Image (cartoon, helix red, strand yellow):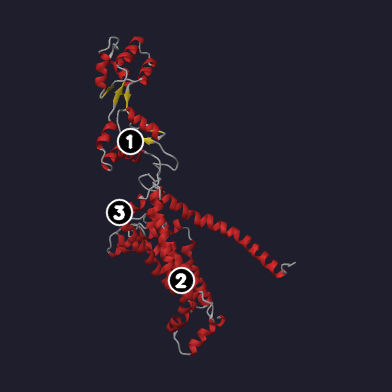
């Protein structure tokens, strides 16, 4: 009989222990990374909004529904027929007349002579009632009686499709299959599955502008500050004495650790028409103005500066740590060979920073794609939408727009585009920086 070796049992136990230790991380990834993406994709395929709600809806003929029925579906005659008020002498109206205290003789005569008849106007019904032997004696009583037979489905909510079409049939309106489908599409107040969010997205003229704004925002901030200026800061502080370099890095961390509201408020105070810049420039002959919102160019300069000062600090720390890890012997050897500072940067430092630069570029790109809080606090996407980026458009559409009708489905579709763009950018960066060579084992191990 064969027995498992102690080494095999230990290896199996280690695997089980490893899986148990990874289980919380796996649950965390599923709940906080995969689940939001899946839910975003699901919401993107619906027309959910505050108007439709997130639960089941009802069927209701409204003025907007009738307008859409005529303009979008070409059923203006049907819309006019639904909007028309009819007066029908039916059992429900006769019972209501009895409950209102109408005489037995009048109710009996209504049931005997007018039951089942419909009238296109209230005046026609009142003429028919006046012709009865037991008609009401006063004008007020006549109008009160005729109001009981008023029949209209406008602004009436119907819980089911059968109940709704039954009410339409009660008005004497016969529908074909095309009209039924159009009526369902325009009167249903709940959400439905649809792919129209994406066709709408690519047909709106604002989409192209928002996309270009996002490209400007991400790559201008990334190249100038989050990667470029951060690299300059890390190299400069590398050649400084340790104590001044530490103080300098700590100062550059202040924008990142400051509360965003306070941080942006300081920039606003700098740019206000009564702020710091105006205080300095007005005596020099310049007009007092809001330098941040005066024109789109100024707004973009401030947006890049506001976000860049925050983003540069992270890159500075990563690059500084990476430079510190470079063996000192490489710098000594380069000095022996007569290399100056620029040659050390080019041939010693930069080749060793390919991995950190890849990380910062990829991470900061994804971060900038989804960030909008500083833009929201500084310009709210203005002036005139000039600084509205894709993430801000998704937020305003789904969670906080001026019209009050929050479009969850359309906002989720906008957010889903960001997810797709983020994945594409990540793959492009891995290819650009030759990720396989970065993670390849050293030649000595091959």
Residue sitting at the far right: 1
- Marks 3 & 2, CB-CB < 8 Å contact: no
Image coordinates of residue 121 in percent, x first then y, are 25, 24
Q: Residue at x 38, y 17 (%)?
A: 95
Quadrant that contains the N terminus: bottom right
Say few, some or many: other residues with alpha carbon within 10 Å of mark 3 (under 14 / 14 to 19 / 20 or more): few
**Residue wearing tag 1:** 62
Q: Which mark is residue 273?
A: none
Q: Nearer the viewer, residue 25 or 272?
A: 25
Q: CA distance from mark 1 to mark 2?
A: 56 Å
Q: Which of the 4 image quadrants contains residue 339?
A: bottom left
Image coordinates of residue 434 in percent, x first then y, are 45, 74
Q: CA distance from mark 1 to mark 3?
A: 27 Å
**Residue wearing tag 2:** 358
- Disc 1 element: loop
Relative to 305, residue 196 above or below: above
**Residue wearing tag 3:** 203
Q: Nearer the viewer, residue 93 or 361?
A: 93
- Disc 2 element: helix
Q: Residue at x 36, y 10 (%)?
A: 104
Residue 445 in view: yes
- 1 or 2: tag closer to the N-terminus: 1
Relative to 76, residue 416 above or below: below
- 3 or 2: tag closer to the N-terminus: 3
């Amino acid at each position: 009989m064969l027995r498992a070796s102690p080494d095999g049992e230990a290896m199996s136990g280690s695997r089980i222990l490893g899986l148990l230790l990874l289980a919380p991380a796996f649950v965390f990834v599923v709940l906080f990374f995969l689940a939001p993406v899946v839910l975003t994709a699901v919401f993107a395929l619906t027309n959910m909004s505050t108007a439709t709600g997130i639960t089941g809806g009802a069927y209701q003929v409204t003025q907007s529904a009738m307008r859409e029925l005529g303009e979008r579906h070409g059923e203006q005659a049907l819309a006019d027929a639904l909007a028309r008020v009819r007066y029908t002498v039916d059992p429900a109206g006769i019972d209501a007349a009895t409950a209102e205290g109408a005489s037995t003789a009048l109710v009996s005569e209504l049931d005997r002579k007018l039951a089942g008849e419909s009238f296109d106007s209230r005046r026609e019904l009142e003429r028919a009632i006046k012709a009865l032997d037991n008609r009401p004696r006063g004008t007020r009583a006549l109008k009160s009686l005729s109001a009981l037979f008023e029949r209209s489905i406008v602004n009436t909510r119907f819980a089911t499709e059968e109940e709704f079409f039954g009410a339409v049939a009660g008005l004497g309106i016969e529908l074909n299959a095309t009209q039924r489908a159009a009526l369902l599409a325009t009167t249903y107040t709940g959400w439905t599955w649809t792919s129209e969010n994406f066709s709408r997205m690519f047909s709106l003229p604002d989409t192209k502008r928002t996309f270009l704004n996002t490209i400007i925002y991400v790559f201008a901030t990334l190249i100038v500050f989050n990667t470029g200026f951060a690299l300059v800061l890390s190299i400069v502080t590398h050649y400084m004495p340790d104590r001044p370099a530490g103080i300098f890095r700590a100062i550059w961390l202040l924008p990142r650790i400051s509360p965003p509201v306070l941080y942006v408020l300081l920039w606003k105070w700098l740019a206000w028409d009564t702020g710091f810049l105006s205080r300095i420039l007005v005596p020099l002959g310049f007009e007092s103005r809001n330098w941040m919102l005066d024109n789109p160019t100024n707004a973009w300069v401030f947006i890049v500066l506001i976000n860049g000062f925050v983003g540069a600090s992270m890159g500075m720390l990563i690059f500084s740590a990476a430079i510190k890890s470079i063996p000192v012997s490489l710098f000594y050897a380069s000095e022996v060979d007569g290399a100056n500072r620029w040659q050390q940067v080019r041939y010693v430092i930069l080749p060793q920073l390919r991995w950190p630069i890849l990380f910062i570029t990829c991470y900061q790109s994804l971060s900038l794609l989804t960030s909008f809080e500083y833009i929201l606090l500084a310009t709210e996407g203005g002036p005139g939408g000039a600084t509205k980026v894709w993430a801000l458009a998704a937020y305003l559409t789904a969670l906080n727009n001026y019209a009050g009708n929050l479009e969850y489905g359309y906002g989720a579709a906008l957010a889903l585009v960001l997810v797709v763009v983020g994945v594409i950018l990540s793959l492009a960066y891995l290819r650009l920086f030759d990720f396989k060579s970065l993670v390849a084992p050293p030649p000595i191990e091959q």
